[in-house]
Image (cartoon, rainbow, N blue to C red):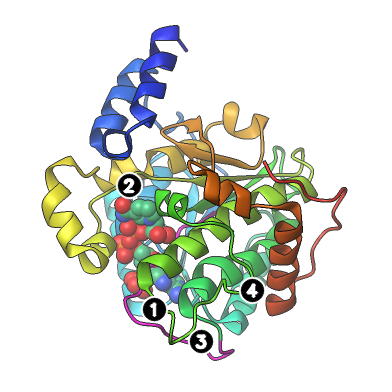
Amino acid sequence: MSNLADVVDRLLEVPIAPSFTRIGHDIRRRLDHWGESTPASLDGRVMVVTGATSGLGAATATRLAVAGATVVLVGRDAARTGRAAADVAAHSGRSVVAPVIADLSELDAVRAAAAELRDRFGRLDVVVHNAGALLADRRSTSTGDEATVASQVLGPFLLTSLLLPVLSVGPRPGRVLTMSSGGMYSTGLHVTDLQMTVDTYRGTEQYARAKRAQVTLNELWARRVDRSAVVFHAVHPGWADTPGVAEALPTFRTILRPLLRTPDQGADTMVWLAADDGDPLATSGGFWLDRRCRTIHRLGSTRRSDTPARRRQLWDLVVARTGADVPPDPAPATAP
Ligand SMILES: NC(=O)c1ccc[n+]([C@@H]2O[C@H](COP(=O)([O-])OP(=O)(O)OC[C@H]3O[C@@H](n4cnc5c(N)ncnc54)[C@H](OP(=O)(O)O)[C@@H]3O)[C@@H](O)[C@H]2O)c1
């Protein structure tokens, strides 16, 4: 990686807009000389992708299938997920195995999905936690949890805990990869008010709190699990033109549309983390944009909110809400 690439990369990071749009992606791709984002062959590797019915998840699943991975789609609607699996097969020229049906905001469904994945595949190489949405109105799950937190924090946390045994038996470390968002830069670490109430609910703030929790838990998992067994990474995809953005942020999309990344560009770093056996396996707990590890704080206020005590509270809260069986903490958590 050249000095010029380092300097330009840092300059791009200062203002958000060029960094998050296709401008940041295109410049970094040229400066860092990315080759094809998928290696010659992922034959024999089994990779689970959630939220693959559209947008970034569909792009990720297709790219991984093109490279030869056995891709397992997890989706909440059987018809939509079946169609997505057929699309991935058609675009990749590879057959795709039967999908697993689960609403990730429902913990019983997550437990059933984990059991099915463990039974069908004795070994998993990668789990991509990509499913997510920004919900304008507050919704509750059957356990009374707020739906954004349930689908993007509680469900994925439980799924990770249940899949750890099959992620750690391969010839190389397993990978747990989470699609977070630059939206989390705007908010601090919330625990007691992680789930907003009917009175306080604002979709963008609830989404940011869930995404902040994701990157924090990503770091906490990495502390607990030896990276020779499983590595953990979170991804910031930039701003990509997907059905999710069109539905949740129509004005933002209209204004920025010429600059938004394609789903393939937004999925690039996720695909690289899933497929490359170099940097992605050399570290754990990173937060990545355009194939480089990034800070999880841009503001002093969010950094101050991120205390070791609050991190412990977050972990304990998520364990309590999910009933997950988790490995012990080797040492008290510290803020970055
Ligand atoms: N696009 C961006 O610029 C951007 C930026 C930052 C972060 N992200 C993140 O990237 C991820 C993908 O978003 P996208 O933009 O590609 O949006 P998208 O096209 O709307 O895709 C979202 C996917 O998540 C699935 N999903 C949502 N809730 C679910 C649940 N409870 N259980 C199972 N599946 C569920 C959807 O399935 P259904 O078909 O059933 O609805 C769909 O497959 C999300 O985590 C999002 O927060 C996107």
Distance from disc 1 to disc 4, alpha carbons, whole Å, reads: 35 Å
Q: Position of residue 114 (x, y in %)?
A: 64, 70
The answer to whether marks 3 and 4 mark residues whose Cβ atoms lie closer than 8 Å is: no
Distance from disc 3 to disc 1, alpha carbons, whole Å, reads: 19 Å
**How many dots with numbers?**
4
Check disc 4 and report the residue beneath it. Answer: 192
Element under disc 1? helix
Q: Is residue 260 rendered to the left or right of residue 93?
A: left
Which tag, 1 or 2, sits closer to the chain's start? Answer: 1
Q: Is residue 313 rendered to the left or right of residue 95?
A: right
Distance from disc 1 to disc 2, alpha carbons, whole Å, reads: 21 Å
Residue that protrudes farthest toward the top in the picture:
3
- Prevalent SS, magenta region: loop
Q: Position of residue 329 (x, y in %)?
A: 84, 54
Q: Position of residue 308 (x, y in %)?
A: 75, 52
Check disc 1 and report the residue beneath it. Answer: 78
Magenta stretch containing residue 11, yes or no?
A: no
Residue 77 position (above or below residue 5): below
What residue sits 51% from the left and 35% below the top? 294
Distance from disc 4 to disc 2, alpha carbons, whole Å, reads: 44 Å
Q: In the rendered structure, which segment of residues is drawn in magenta? A: 128-144
Element under disc 2? helix
The answer to whether marks 3 and 1 mark residues whose Cβ atoms lie closer than 8 Å is: no
Which tag, 1 or 4, sits closer to the chain's start? Answer: 1
**Looking at mark 2, is its residue's CB closer than 8 Å to ligand 1?**
no
Find ligand 1 in the image and state its quadrant. Answer: bottom left
Which tag, 2 or 3, sits closer to the chain's start? Answer: 2
Check disc 3 and report the residue beneath it. Answer: 141
Looking at the rendered structure, the kind of residue marked 2 is Ser
Which tag, 4 or 2, sits closer to the chain's start? Answer: 2
Which mark, by number, is residue 92? Answer: 2
